[in-house]
Image (cartoon, helix red, strand yellow):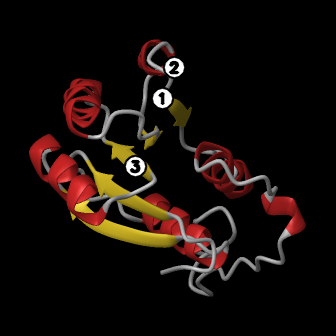
């Protein structure tokens, strides 16, 4: 178990092949003290089964633009794990962001800060800490610049 005692499940809802963002979020959440269960690309059934089996405190979904998968996942989660919070990131259109936020799903599109995502994880897991108060060092792959572009 992590130092915080909180477990987050991360999953990709699409077969888009883009892993950099979700991998950075996974690493930063681990650095902040969360136990992160990364299941990779998964269907709503697989995500919900893993969330129940792992008894997670938060579910993070990397969305490849298909928010209907998020809706299906959240509906199934609400049936089996009432009250487990969900946040989503990735390629999410502005209209879809509004739709998800109306369901109390926090949304972090490309360009969102890792600090904001970690703060959301603390808040959603009901931990009264801000990421900015932690000593979390970003370890950017030297093959890439801070914005992810190759030098």
Q: What residue is drawn where x is 43% and y is 21%?
A: 100
Q: Where is the C terminus found, in terms of image quarters? A: bottom right
Give residue 145's mark.
Answer: none
The residue carrying mark 2 is: 101
**Residue 59: where, in percent of width, then height?**
40, 49
Q: Please give left or right for residue 12 compared with residue 7 in the image.
A: left
Q: Is residue 150 above or below residue 25?
A: below
> Marks 2 and 3, Cα distance to the nearest angstrom?
15 Å
**Residue 60: where, in percent of width, then height?**
42, 49
Q: Please give left or right for residue 141 compared with residue 23 in the image.
A: right
Q: What residue is drawn where x is 16% and y is 41%?
A: 44
Q: What residue is drawn where x is 44% and y is 70%?
A: 36
Looking at the image, do the residues carrying marks 2 and 1 touch, with CB atoms under 8 Å apart? yes
The residue carrying mark 1 is: 105
- Return the disc, 2 or 3, that comes first in the chain's sequence: 3
Q: Residues within 10 Å of mark 2 (few under 14, many from 20)?
A: few
> Marks 1 and 3, Cα distance to the nearest angstrom?
10 Å
Q: Residues within 10 Å of mark 1 (few under 14, many from 20)?
A: some
Question: Which is more foreground, mark 2 or mark 3?
Answer: 3
Q: How many marks?
A: 3
> Marks 2 and 1, Cα distance to the nearest angstrom?
5 Å
Image quarter for residue 141?
A: bottom right
- Return the disc, 1 or 3, that comes first in the chain's sequence: 3
Image quarter for residue 42?
A: bottom left
Q: What residue is drawn where x is 63% and y is 50%?
A: 117
The residue carrying mark 3 is: 59
Q: 60 or 3: which is nearer to us? A: 3
Q: Name the element at disc 3.
A: strand
Q: Residues within 10 Å of mark 3 (few under 14, many from 20)?
A: many
Residue 15 appears anywhere in the view = no
Q: Is residue 136 above or below residue 15?
A: below
Q: Name the element at disc 1.
A: loop
């Amino acid at each position: 178990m992590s130092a915080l005692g909180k477990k987050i499940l991360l999953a990709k809802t699409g077969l888009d092949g883009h892993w950099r963002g979700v991998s950075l979020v996974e690493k930063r959440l681990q650095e902040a003290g969360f136990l992160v269960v990364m299941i990779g690309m998964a269907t709503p059934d697989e995500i919900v089964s893993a969330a129940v089996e792992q008894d997670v405190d938060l579910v993070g979904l990397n969305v490849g633009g298909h928010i209907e998968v998020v809706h299906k996942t959240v509906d199934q989660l609400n049936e089996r794990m009432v009250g487990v919070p969900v946040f989503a990131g990735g390629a999410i259109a502005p209209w879809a962001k509004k739709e998800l936020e109306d369901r109390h799903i926090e949304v972090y599109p490309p360009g969102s800060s890792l600090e904001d995502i970690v703060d959301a994880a603390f808040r959603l897991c009901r931990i009264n800490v801000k990421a900015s108060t932690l000593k979390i060092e970003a370890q950017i792959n030297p093959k890439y610049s801070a914005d992810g572009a190759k030098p």
